[in-house]
């Protein structure tokens, strides 16, 4: 019954073992002998270090952008809008979640293009780092809005009124009451935005121009270079990062919000 | 909360801006499918239905669509069977390694798709010696779709409790009969919601598919991605994208109907 699950775990384990295999420089054949060369390459060759750090930086930026964009709309939905409006807004935010990932990335290719609507309005960042961050933030936005909305809904109205009665301004209430209580929800959302950005290579190809991220290196090593052991070694980086991240945020209680 | 008029206005403006940000790109895709310019010059000089005719005649797009539908249907069936059994086993019986299994089911979707992709690619090619193709895509999609069914069924089972099944057993029904007459009817809408999510997830998937598809099978996302950078195919790709945008309203409508009758479906992942 759990055959598929076991098979999947075996596949993951095998991947991990493959990461320690080498590749013959001359023939390109995979040599099944234990070696740490792949990991050595990973840490010593500057280009891979740069790409790892760059990918982490982009993931962090995308997460921050999503958190900033998500808060006002989630707050409006949870605390200000009337129930009927709220219901419509939830659907409006959910709807793009169902639209194809690829189509959404493609849509931004059109938005950013030199002859597209942004250029017509006056300015487009073009294909590259800025365009990529906008596109990724766009792609993962619902994954941030929904947990934050759920988190804000759980903040009791009475607390907000109490804060107001005690003389706090609305902004003060948001800063000192709402945000600390909603923090685990932001962390829950960030797990998605962070993890999804780490593994992405499709959007990078569509709107990133010449830009390379971790996923592209893995992809190129499986396909063109046919160096599966190195791809496997590099693919352990996002796994390790995510495990560390999950371990770090577990204490905030965010994982119960997933 | 005593929101001042000013704050309320700011929030309203932000909300409106986010909605524009969310829908403008999708609207652009739909509009561009009528744009007479081959390179989508904005604003469009004139509108045309030419690209829609061209897309309807495109054999590549059509066969990719059929492949995608077949794979999504098969993967959904696999996910339904395995996801239901896993959820039943976990919530109705206690056994060794129970917690580990629930983590295991979530793993394929919690890890970046690229990891799942090359893990399966490696397992198929170098360990099992299976030729990549239609079958390997179905297995791969089935693997990460299990979680949607599993989540929905497990949530439902937890809410239902076991009293109904016990009553059925007390009245003399065997396990299989109880499942058929008592458990299954109560699970039906949860199964539907899970299946809907699984189908959508599989239909849209590209990362894992890239690594498990081999060279001669093309799903629709793979076809779009392969033709995206060819200027000649641009308008046809855009029409396909526009169709997908419009079609994505269907699952929303279905999910909304489902949640009206029986609790909101648990969103993936």
Image: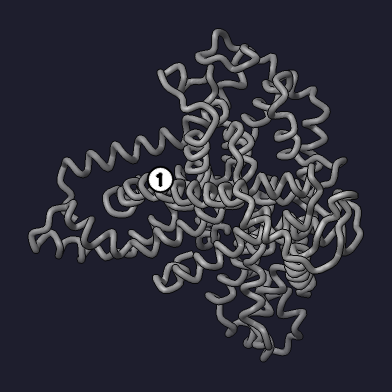
**Viewer can see residue A28:** yes
The correct choice, above or below, for A220 with respect to B59 in the image is below
**Snapshot quadrant of residue B248:** top right
Q: Name the residue under label 1.
A: A65
A164 or A17: which is nearer to us?
A: A17
What residue appears at the point 13 percent right and 59 percent down from the top-left corner?
A164
Q: Position of residue B193 (x, y in %)?
A: 61, 58
Task: Find numbered disc 1 in the image and state the secondary structure of the residue it sits on.
Answer: helix
Residue placed most toward the observer, A2 or A186: A186
Residue name at image x 19 percent, y 58 percent: A173
Exactly how many numbered labels are in the figure?
1
Badge 1: how crowded within 10 Å, few (<14), some, or many (20+)? some
Looking at the picture, how far across and down is residue A221, in whole percent? Answer: 75, 48
Left/right placement of residue B36 relative to residue B78 reads left
Question: Closest to the observer: B246 or B111?
Answer: B111
**x, y percent for residue B140:** 76, 57
Instruction: Report if residue A87 is visible in the image.
Output: no
Q: In which quarter of the image is the N terminus of chain A?
A: bottom right
Which color scheme does this rendered protein use?
A: one colour
Q: Which residue is drawn at 86% across and 65% down?
A: A32
Q: Check the image and report above or below for A180 versus B58.
A: below
Q: Nearer the viewer, residue A165 or A227?
A: A227
In the rendered image, residue B122, in percent from the top left (x then y), is placed at: 81, 59
Subunit bearing disc 1 = A
Give the left or right position of residue B1, taking residue A48 as reference. Answer: left
Give the quarter of the image for residue B105: bottom right
B118 shown above or below A72: below
**Does A81 sit above or below residue A167?**
above
């Amino acid at each position: 019954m759990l055959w598929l699950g076991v098979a999947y775990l075996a596949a993951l384990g095998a991947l991990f073992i493959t990461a320690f295999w080498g590749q013959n420089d001359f023939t390109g054949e995979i040599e099944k002998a234990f070696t740490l060369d792949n990991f050595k390459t990973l840490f010593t060759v500057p280009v891979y270090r740069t790409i790892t750090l760059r990918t982490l930086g982009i993931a962090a930026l995308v997460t921050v952008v999503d958190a900033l964009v998500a808060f006002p709309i989630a707050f409006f939905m949870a605390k200000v809008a009337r129930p009927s409006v709220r219901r419509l807004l939830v659907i409006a935010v959910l709807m793009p979640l169902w639209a194809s990932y690829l189509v959404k990335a493609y849509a931004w290719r059109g938005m950013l293009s030199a002859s597209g609507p942004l250029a017509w309005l006056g300015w487009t960042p073009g294909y590259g780092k800025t365009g990529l961050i906008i596109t990724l933030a766009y792609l993962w936005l619902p994954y941030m809005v929904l947990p934050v909305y759920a988190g804000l809904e759980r903040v009791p109205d009475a607390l907000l009124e109490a804060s107001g009665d005690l003389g706090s301004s609305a902004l003060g209430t948001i800063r000192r009451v709402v945000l600390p209580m909603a923090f685990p929800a932001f962390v829950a959302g960030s797990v998605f935005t962070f993890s999804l950005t780490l593994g992405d290579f499709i959007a990078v190809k569509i709107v990133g121009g010449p830009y390379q991220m971790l996923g592209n290196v893995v992809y190129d090593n499986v396909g063109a270079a046919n160096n599966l052991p190195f791809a496997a070694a590099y693919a352990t980086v996002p796994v390790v990062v995510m495990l560390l991240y999950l371990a770090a945020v577990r204490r905030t209680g965010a994982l119960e919000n997933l | 909360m005593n929101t001042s008029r000013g704050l309320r206005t700011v929030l309203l403006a932000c909300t409106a801006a986010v909605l524009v940000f969310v829908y403008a790109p999708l609207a652009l895709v739909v509009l561009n499918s009528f744009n007479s310019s081959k390179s989508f010059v904005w604003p469009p000089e004139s509108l045309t239905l030419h690209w829609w005719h061209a897309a309807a005649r495109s054999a590549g797009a059509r066969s990719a669509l059929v492949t995608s539908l077949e794979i999504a249907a098969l993967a959904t069936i696999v996910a339904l069977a395995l996801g239901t059994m896993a959820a039943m086993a976990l919530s109705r019986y206690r056994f060794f390694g129970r917690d580990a299994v629930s983590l295991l089911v979530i793993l394929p979707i919690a890890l970046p798709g690229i990891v799942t992709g090359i893990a399966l690619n490696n397992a198929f090619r170098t360990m099992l010696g299976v030729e990549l193709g239609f079958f390997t895509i179905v297995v791969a999609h089935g693997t990460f779709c299990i979680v949607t069914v599993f989540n929905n069924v497990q949530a439902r089972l937890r809410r239902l409790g076991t009293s109904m099944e016990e009553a059925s057993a007390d009245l003399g029904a065997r396990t299989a009969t109880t499942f058929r007459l008592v458990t299954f009817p109560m699970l039906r809408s949860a199964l539907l919601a899970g299946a809907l999510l699984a189908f959508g997830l599989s239909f849209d998937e590209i990362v894992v598919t890239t690594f498990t598809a081999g060279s001669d099978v093309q799903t629709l996302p793979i076809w779009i991605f392969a033709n995206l950078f060819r200027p000649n195919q641009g308008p046809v790709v855009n029409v396909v994208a526009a169709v997908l945008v419009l079609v994505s309203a269907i699952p929303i409508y279905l999910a909304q109907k489902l949640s009206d009758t029986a609790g909101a479906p648990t969103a993936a992942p």
